[in-house]
Every structure is written in C-alpha cells, then in structure tokens.
Amino acid sequence: MPWVKLDDRFPSHRKVALLSDRAFRLHVSAICWCSENLTDGRIADRELPLVAHIRGIKATAKQLEDAGLWTRTGDGWEVHDFLDYNPSREQVLAERKKNAERQERFRRRKNGKPTPPDGSGTPSNGVSNGVTAEGADAAETHDGDTTEARRRHDGDTTATGSRHEEQTEPQVNGIRNGVTNGAPSRPVPTPTPSMADVGGEGARSTRADAAPLAPIDAANFALTDGMRRWAHRDGYAQLIDIDHSTAQFVSHYRATGAQRKSWPDAWQKWIRDDAKRAADRRRPGNVIALPSGQPLTGTDAKVAGWMAIAEQLRQEGDPA
C-alpha cells in the first residue's frame, strides 16, 4: 500500500496545534485512510465511520472543517491540499504497473527467456554470448544479458558488478507505490560481494548498518499543545514538570523498544502515575485524627502519639 510521510512540524502547525485530541486523531487517520484506499483525499459520508473509531465522529469532522483542514463536499469531505503532498490514484497505479512490468522483464532475463520491449523502442532478444567486451563496449549495458559478464541490468539491484560504484541517485523512484524520495530518512546500504570481498576504496566506504528506529521514534511521538492543555486542565501540571516527565517517558520507551497501540494514551497514563507518586510524597505519613475529626500533622501528631502511648502505659500499670 502507499506510504504516508508527515512533516516533523505537522503537530505544531497553527491549524493542527489547536485541535482536540479526537480531531487530531481523526485527521491523521483520514490522511492514512485516503492514501491506503487511493481516494485522492475524498471521504464519503458513509465511509466516515471506517476512518477512525471515535465518539462523536460527525461533530469531530465539523471541527476539522471549521479549522480549514477539511472541505465539505456534496456527499462527504475532502482533505485540504491532499494531492499537494501525496501522489494521486492515477500516479500510484501507473507506477505499480511500471514496477510490475520491470519485474517481469527481470524474471524473464534471469530465466534466459526473450523479453518484450521496455517502451524505449529497443527490443531485447534475451540472448548473451557470455563474453566480456573490451574497451568502450565493456561499459555498455544490454537488456538481454543473463550472465555475470555484464556490469548490471537496468533496474536490477541484485546483479553483481565488476567493481564497486558510488551511487549518487536514490535507489527508490520518485513514486514507488506512493513512497517519496524523502523516505526512509535513514537509508541502510546493502553490501555487494565486490564491497565485502575486495579491499580498497569500495570496502572502506562500507559502513555498519544503521540501528533501526525505536517504535516511539518511528511513530514521531511529540508533546503537543493539546496534550499540555490536558495536563493543565486535569491539574497534573501543578504536581509535576510535564516536560521532564515527557522526556523520561520517551527515554524509557526508546531504551526498552516497547510498542504501544496509542502513544498519546500511554503518555497520559505515564503522567497520571507520575502525578500520583508526587502527590503521595507530599501527603504526610504521620497524621492523627482527634475525636473531633480534626487531623494533626507534623510535630503536633508526634506529640499526640507519645501522649497516647504514655496514657496507655499508665492505664496498664494501675491495679484493677
């Protein structure tokens, strides 16, 4: 399915930052849903419940409409500027067809079968004499070559090269099932046999595989204005430092690599637990209630406690 890549400043955009938690969730879910179903950003009224399972979904959609993020149409909504940041249905289907044709040509070449023209006007006969060319012909690429004598097939990422070549172009097309050149942000090079077995510049340029992102980083979790408002509204910000607790939350899940179905929900539970521990620390442990119901704390409670013990000892010492 197509991939969706959100800008890292998306949560802080002035239209998005003022959304409620439900509206934020519905908006992000709608972007993913439209990309997955190739709707070009359109959502019909009857399809709205399929986008996200939240309470008051129609009222939440109206919030997004009022914020200028959705536009009301005759029979539903349309995500504002969806096609400015995502490939259209026509582009995705055309790229999928192109990829399927390229893979079929590669399979036929690999099996030594004739391949149809690739659209460039140069037919391929699928035959190779297996002899390495000399001079200028050695650098020429033939679609029909099936032996390792040729340097590489056009579009074949698994073919063995005669020497290592520094790649200056991205290995992912501009649109590959909806994936843009901007993703992934951490490309992991795959060493070829010539890089692993031959010394020199090719071997020295190989670096260790980059470590995979922790789930919390892959989800682009970030503290939003809406989350801050929730913490202030429920009184948690008066008990703890929200930024410090959030940093501890991120560090914990980055170190453990644990996955959570909803990171905002996990964050809220973390904040509630932090606030409860802070409140417990502030609550005096030596509290004594007088018969009148008035509580005594601190030094008064200690004195009252010792006096109660003394009275008990006195009564135990009197003869019956």
Image (cartoon, rainbow, N blue to C red):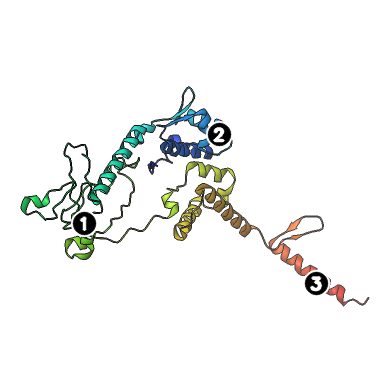
Q: Is tag 3's residue or tag 2's residue first in the polypeptide sequence? A: 2
On the image, the x and y values in percent for residue 223 come to 47, 47
Work out whether 173 lies above or below 298. Answer: above
Compared with residue 2, is residue 217 higher up or lower down, i.e. above or below? below
Check residue 57 in the rendering and tell me which mark sits there, or answer none.
2
Q: Secondary structure at mark 1?
A: loop
Does the CB distance between marks 1 and 2 fall below 8 Å? no
Three-letter amino acid code at the position of disc 3: Ala
Regarding residue 170, the answer to whether it shows in the image is no
| Residue 134 relative to residue 36: left or right | left
Identify which residue, 287 or 55, lies in the foreground: 55
Q: Residues within 10 Å of mark 2 (few under 14, many from 20)?
A: some
Of the pair 287 and 222, the residue shown nearer to us: 222
Q: Nearer the viewer, mark 3 or mark 2?
A: 2
Q: Which residue does the image show at 42% across and 52% down from the upper left?
A: 217
The residue where tag 1 is placed is: 160
List the single residue furthest toward the right: 320
Residue 144, horizontal then vertical, whole percent: 18, 47
Residue ID at (19%, 64%): 198
Quadrant assignment, res 200: bottom left
Q: Quadrant of the C terminus?
A: bottom right
